[in-house]
Amino acid sequence: MPSSFSWLDFAETERQRAMQVIDLFRETETVDELGFAPIRDAFADHFFPGTSTIQTRARYFLFVPWLILQDERRKLPAAERTAKLRQRETQLIHALLAGGADQSGVIGSQSLGRLKRMPSSVYWRGLRLWGIRRFDGSLEQYFRRLAKGERPEATLCTDDGEPLADVGPAWDADLPERPANLDETVRLELQADEAEFLRDRILTAQGRSVMARLVDSGRPAIEAPHIWDPSIEPHVLRAQWSEIEHARCFALCAWGGPLVYERCVARMKTGTDELLAALEERLVEWREALMSTRSALLAWDHATFWALVRRLNPRLATRTQDFAKRWIVVAMRAVAGEAVWQDPQVEALVAARERQLKGGRARLLPENLRARDRWVGNAGIGPLDYRWGRTSVIVNDILQGLASASGAGARDA
């Protein structure tokens, strides 16, 4: 019997987390060969709640409820609602392309109707975390409630997740009005009132986050290559900047792990001379980055860092923490100028970690020639960015919308 997996309806939070993991495999820069993801994602979710690696633009936080609510008052079977929503989301792709939007931000611009994960799936969890969606359940559960003639309502829960009472509508009552031309031609840029709504929802639902501080910064845009860029510091609280510094130190240390892994696999495969040369350059770049941050890394309080990680991810596996600790020790040797990637013991550490994670599928197993044959190396690996690359676009969408003249021009150009 072929293997398969399915989702339990009541485990919506776990389902969304698992979908995020699946999304990572679509992102070449987020491939996690050594299992650093639980630490990386704990910081990313803490700094930027409601975001994911495959979100593109902020206005999808409005597109999705606008499309879902279009038939809310009609009594339709759940399957028909699902089909209609997919139709509308496909039409949205065409409307965005017709509106002259940047195709790199249009979800499904290449695959169109063949898109596997529609925006409603990609943004569903974020809508809940931003307080735009009040109903705590899956989209399928929501449609089944409507099919029964029920009005899905927000649910208050105890700290243990047990429902207490129904407390109103499933969506925020202040959701901006749906544009009349949403099905024909529309753009990704936010209108001023839409940006204000998203900012206010983030401030209300996630007011303690770094993201909340940034969308309320008053700047027209934030141009920073990393979340730890000095230009960010004035806009966050001192305690938040301290957490960002912890994240920076870990990102710089962890950066070398995947590079050493790539080098190990490349050395076991023929025809990789060019790749090996590129990896050598990147590893030297990694060491130089560590050495240039020497004072901060030497002053880094590891005990405080791990206490923070444990608070952000109480379920962190012991073996993940153990490996990360051992890797940080390796990275600190590189801080002193050592070419640690040439150390057989470091290579053995990486190989053991891959076997721990993958078992018989590990590429570094000598006998696993087929897995190495299918492998394509990546010398472009950079430090962890904690989802900043995607989040900064969403933050700037909101900031630029806030900076636009209120009510200027047509509602949708």
Image (cartoon, rainbow, N blue to C red):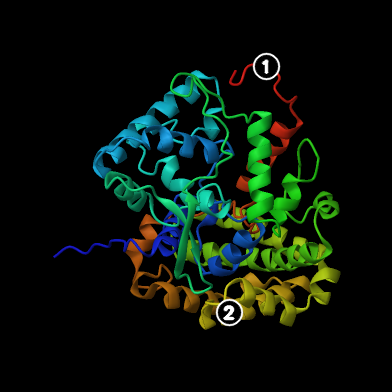
Q: Position of residue 222 (x, y in %)?
A: 76, 42
The residue labelled by disc 1 is 409
Q: Position of residue 117 (x, y in %)?
A: 39, 44
In the image: residue 69, left or right of residue 172: left
Nearest the viewer among 270 and 245 is 245
Q: Are marks 1 and 2 in contact (CB under 8 Å)?
A: no
The residue labelled by disc 2 is 321
What amino acid is found at the position of numbered circle 2 in the picture? Gln
Q: CA distance from mark 1 to mark 2?
A: 53 Å
Of tags 1 and 2, the one toward the viewer is 1
In the image: residue 117, left or right of residue 326: left
In this picture, is 116 found above or below 5? above
Nearest the viewer among 128 and 353 is 128
Residue drawn where x is 70% and y is 61% of the image = 286
Q: Could you say whether the residue bearing mark 2 is in a helix, strand or loop? A: helix
Q: Position of residue 263 (x, y in %)?
A: 54, 63
Based on the displayed image, in which of its 4 quarters is residue 174 positioned?
A: top right
Nearest the viewer among 234 and 367 is 234
Mark 1, other Cα within 10 Å: few <14 / some 14–19 / many ≥20: few
Based on the displayed image, in which of its 4 quarters is residue 209 positioned?
A: bottom right
| Residue 116 shows in the view | yes
